[in-house]
Amino acid sequence: MTATTPGLASPAPAPETPPGRPPQRVVVVGGGPGGYEAALVARRSGADVTLVERQGLGGAAVLTDVVPSKTLIATAEWMTIADRASELGIRTVGLPTDTPVRGHEVDLGKVNARVVELAAAQSADIRTRLETEGVRVVEGTGRLDGPERVVTEAGDSFDADVVLLATGATPRVLPEAMPDGERILTWTQLYTLTELPERLVVVGSGVTGAEFAGAYNALGADVVLVSSRDRVLPGEDADAAQVIEDVFTSRGMTVMSRSRAAGAVRTADGVAVTLADGRVVEGSHCLIAVGAIPSTEGLGLDEAGVRLTENRYIEVDKVSRTSARGVYAAGDCTGVLPLASVAAMQGRIAMAHALGDAVQPLDLTEVAANIFTAPEIATVGRSQTWLEENAVRFVASTLPLRRNPRAKMLGIRDGFVKVFAHAATGIVLGGVVVAPRAGELIFPLTLAVNHRLTVDQVADSFTVYPSLSGSIAEVARVLHARQA
C-alpha cells in the first residue's frame, strides 16, 4: 500500500434508490482495504451499508502492518541515502573528508511515535470518508448468524442482503518461540520499541522478514537473518533476490541460509534462538516473521455454509463469492494474494457483482507487487519461473541499472530492469525492476502487461533523458532485436 490509501479520493454522491424499491442491505465485517473499499462501492450504488470493525478503520494494513512498516522503511531509506553521500562529495561538517557518513543516529522511540501517529491519522481519514459517504460504522467484533445476518458481541444484529467478510490475517507464531512483546516480537509489536536493538535476529526470509531486516540494518542495528531456504526471498525472481542478498551482506548483515529456527527463549539480557542443527544465535531481540494465518475462527462460517480451504482460508471465486449465497469475502482471509491492493480490488469486485454492476473477474497476472527493501523489487505479470514451467515461448532481456546515466548521477549501483515478452508476438508478459523506488518504476510495465502492449510499442514511447525509466525503453528495444 502506498501513502495514498485506496478509496480516499474525493467523495462522489451516492445514487438514489429507485422509487418503491428498498435499498440493498450490505454488511461488511472488517474495515481493512477490502472492507472499506467494498463499503464505499456499495454506498455509491445506493445500498444501505453497515461496516463492523473491531480494531480500527484501515485494519491491520493501516494500523499494524503496511502503513507502519513502510513508514519505518522510509525512515531507514534516508540512512541508506546518507551512506552514499561521501562518494557524491558530501561530508558531515567537522569530520575528515575520508570519514564515511555515519554521523547520524536513530532515535527509535521518536521514529516509532511518528509511525504510530501517521497510522492513527490514516485510520481517522478513512473513518471520516466512510461517515461522509453515509456508511454506518460499528465498533465491535462481527460474526455470521446464518448467511443473512451479522451479530456482534455487544448484542447488535444486522440483517443483510449481502455480506462481505474482510477479517484479514494475524502473524503466525512458533509454539517454541512465543512472542512476549518485549524481546521476542511479531511485526505488529515492533513499534513499541524505544531503543534500537543492539542485535536483532530475524527469523524468516520472506517479504516481511527481508523488509524489516533491511530496515533495521539501515537504521544501524546489527542484524542476523535466519533463512530456512537457500536464499532470501525464495518466492521472488532469483536474480532479484540475489541482488538483495548481496546488498544485505555488503552492508554487514549476517545471512544464515538453510538454517531453520527451532525455538527462541529469553536470556538474562536478550534472546537465544536455537536452530534445528543445534546451533544457538544470540541477540538482544528476535523478530518472528514466518507468515500469517487467516482470521477466520469464530465467524460462524461453518454454520452459515461458508466453505474453507485446508489452511482455513475462506474459499472464493474470481468475483469474491463464497459457497454461501449472498456472502462474499476479500483480502488476506481468502489467501488469494496478501496485498492491500488485491484486497481492495477484491472488495470492489465483490460489491459490484453483488449489486448488479458489470465486473471484470480478478486477474492476478495484472497485479503489480513491490517489496520495500533497499533497493526495492517490483514485479508484474508472469514470472520467469512460471513461463519456464509452462513451456511458454518467450524472450527476456536484463539491463543493469549501473549503465543508466541517471543512476550514475544518483550513485545507484545495484539493480536492474528485466522484461519478458512472447517470442512470436512480442507482447510483454511480465517484468521485474530492482531499484530505489522500483514501485514507481514498474508502472509502465504494468500498463504494458494489462493492455497487452508489444515491446515495440513500449520502445517507441518517449522517455525523459536522463531517467531511470529510460532503461525500460532500452530493454524493450533489445527485445525487438531478439524477437526479429
Image (cartoon, rainbow, N blue to C red):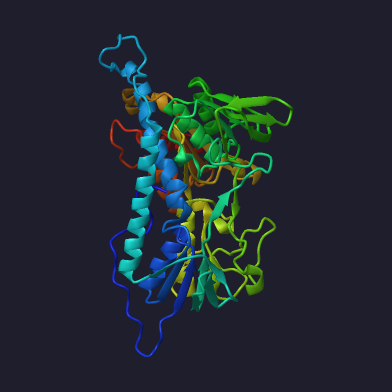
Residue 207 as seen in the image, left or right of residue 43: right
Residue 473: in sight, yes or no?
A: no
In the image, residue 414 above or below residue 48 = above
Q: Quadrant of residue 126?
A: bottom left
In-front residue for pair 405/177: 177
In-front residue for pair 287/36: 287
In-front residue for pair 318/395: 318
Residue 163 image point, x, y percent: 51, 72
Circle count: 0
**Residue closest to the far bottom:** 20
**Residue closest to the far left:** 93
Residue drawn at point x = 31 percent, y = 18 percent: 88
Residue 99 as seen in the image, left or right of residue 483: left
Residue 375 image point, x, y percent: 44, 32
Residue drawn at point x = 28 percent, y = 16 percent: 89
Residue 428: in sight, yes or no?
A: yes
Q: Quadrant of residue 283?
A: top right
Residue 203 image point, x, y percent: 60, 35
Residue drawn at point x = 41 percent, y = 73 percent: 49
Residue drawn at point x = 61 percent, y = 73 percent: 324
**Residue closest to the far front:** 268
Residue 227 image point, x, y percent: 63, 32
